[in-house]
């Protein structure tokens, strides 16, 4: 057993809802079968490498606060290996079947993209070994195209084609690494693909650059035979004034225009939905409505604080509706629940990383149990069914089939009788299940 920052912590176990030991699960029982599938297989929990191991608690006003010793020497390959030991010790103890990472989280820092690529290559063998030893799989890989100063004016959407080439090179390397590690998905997040002012920005040019960039990735994915799912993670703004992949609907329209719809789906993040002025549930439901749902980043925002705070999920009612939606649409295929969440800067005890994830996972487990109850009840679904039932009538079916013209329709107008939408009744039902 290598030395890690978590050596003093034991494997987290399920101890039932009455137990008060904070280092145990109250609800998440990985082998418990719900609606014919284990909790583990329903939820497909993933831990993110960046917030948990590659961030020391620094913010725009202050320095690092956490005990992450490898961050003191970010250019050292040896330190990157120590980080790997601690990360996998954590994955194993928390019982997460998946993890996610960026190229820059895993590899020692390089001054150039070529150096980064060399450093990443050196990590693949030790990483594969860790994955095998711990039976941990890669939910998705991604390239960081936003931290380095070369990307300050965008990666694919940069006015300088040399920046576009650097970004493409980074994605090529990371896509190949993800393929080699048998990743289930590859995520693209356009953190700098947008603008700060239109005074210096040609939107039309930048969108076509972005589309070409994505097409290159699709072509390369097919060339190397990567079978995972490509995903875009929508976000409306911050730190840019505007980001092109604003929300699910915007990305879907963009993919449609550039003939990329069959190749790319969506990774929906709760916090990004909030930033876009929508609910998390809206973004997930919209993704399903357009057959574009892929995976979830479960981290939330703060209602009083309009930026990307990446906090751990704590709203069981909201999660119940999300999980219900996912199950009713056939469950995750390649996707899962990725904890793209970070501790608060004051949460400096090593245990805090555990209790944060345990709390978040328990909320999902409880929400899964609730969702199963609601699905068995069939209360909401049968209400919705009856609300739309008149569309099953012969004339209505003909309208939908395009068999009745506006003129013909106008000959048979009956004044409709209003019906209650019953929102309060349905909310009361939901509260009874979840509160
Ligand atoms: Mn995210």
Image: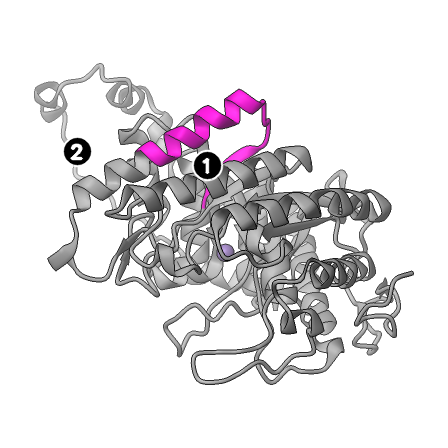
- Residue 404 seen by the camera: yes
| Secondary structure found at label 2 | loop
Q: Which mark is residue 22?
A: none
Judged left or right of residue 413, residue 207 is: right
Residue in the picture at 61% in, 69% down: 435
Q: Main secondary structure of the magenta part?
A: helix
Q: Position of residue 113 (x, y in %)?
A: 48, 48
Q: Nearer the viewer, residue 295 or 51?
A: 51
Asked if residue 199 lies in the magenta stretch, the reply is no
Judged left or right of residue 143, residue 162 is: left
The range drawn in magenta is: 212-232
Residue 153, quarter of picture: bottom left
Q: Which residue does the numbered mark 1 point to in the structure image?
A: 265
Q: Nearer the viewer, mark 2 or mark 1?
A: 1
Q: Position of residue 147 (x, y in %)?
A: 44, 60
Q: Nearer the viewer, residue 314 or 427?
A: 314
For ligand 1, tell me if the residue under mark 1 lies within 8 Å. Answer: no
Pointer 2: residues within 10 angstroms few (<14), some, or many (20+)?
few
Residue in the picture at 43% in, 49% down: 189
Asked if residue 338 is positioned above or below residue 5 in the image, the reply reads above
Residue 303, quarter of picture: bottom left
Residue in the picture at 65% in, 65% down: 53
Q: Which residue does the numbered mark 2 point to in the structure image?
A: 414
| Secondary structure found at label 1 | strand
Pointer 1: residues within 10 angstroms few (<14), some, or many (20+)?
many
Residue in the picture at 34% in, 24% down: 393
Q: CA distance from mark 2 to mark 1?
A: 42 Å
């Amino acid at each position: 057993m290598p030395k890690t920052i978590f050596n003093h912590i034991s494997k987290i176990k399920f101890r039932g809802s009455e137990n008060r030991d904070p280092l145990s699960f109250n609800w998440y029982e990985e082998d418990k079968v719900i609606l014919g599938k284990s909790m583990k297989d329903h939820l497909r929990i993933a831990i993110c490498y960046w917030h948990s191991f590659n961030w020391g608690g620094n913010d725009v006003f202050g320095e690092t606060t956490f005990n992450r010793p490898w961050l003191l020497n970010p250019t050292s390959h040896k330190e990157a290996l120590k980080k790997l030991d601690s990360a996998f010790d954590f994955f194993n103890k928390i019982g997460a079947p998946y993890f996610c990472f960026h190229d820059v989280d895993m590899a020692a820092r390089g001054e150039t993209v070529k150096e980064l690529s060399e450093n990443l290559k050196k990590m693949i063998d030790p990483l594969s070994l860790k994955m095998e030893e711990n039976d941990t799989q890669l939910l998705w890989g991604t390239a960081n195209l936003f931290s380095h100063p070369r990307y300050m004016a965008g990666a694919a959407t940069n006015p300088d084609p040399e920046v576009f080439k650097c970004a493409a090179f980074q994605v090529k390397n990371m896509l190949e690494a993800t393929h080699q590690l048998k990743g289930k998905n590859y995520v693209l997040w356009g953190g700098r693909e947008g603008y700060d002012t239109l005074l210096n920005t040609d939107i039309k040019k930048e969108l076509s650059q972005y589309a070409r960039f994505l097409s290159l990735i699709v072509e390369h994915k097919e060339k190397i035979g990567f079978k995972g799912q490509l995903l875009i993670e929508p976000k409306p703004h911050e730190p840019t004034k505007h980001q092109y992949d604003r929300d699910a609907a915007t990305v879907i329209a963009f993919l449609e225009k550039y003939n990329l719809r069959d190749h790319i789906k969506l990774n929906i993040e709760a916090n990004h939905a909030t930033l876009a002025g929508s609910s998390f549930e809206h973004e997930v439901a919209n993704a399903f409505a357009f057959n574009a749902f892929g995976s979830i980043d479960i981290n939330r925002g703060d209602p009083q604080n309009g930026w990307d705070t990446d906090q751990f999920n704590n709203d069981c009612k909201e999660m119940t509706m999300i999980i219900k939606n996912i199950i009713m649409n056939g469950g995750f295929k390649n996707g899962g629940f990725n904890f793209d969440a970070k501790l608060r800067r004051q949460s400096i005890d090593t245990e805090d990383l555990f209790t944060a994830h345990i709390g978040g996972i328990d909320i999902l487990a409880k929400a899964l149990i609730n969702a199963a109850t609601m699905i068995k009840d069939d209360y909401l679904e049968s209400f919705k069914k009856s609300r739309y039932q008149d569309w099953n009538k012969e004339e209505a079916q003909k309208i939908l089939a395009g068999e009745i013209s506006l003129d013909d329709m106008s000959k048979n107008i009956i004044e409709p009788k209003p019906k209650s939408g019953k929102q309060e009744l349905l909310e009361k039902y939901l509260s009874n299940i979840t509160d």
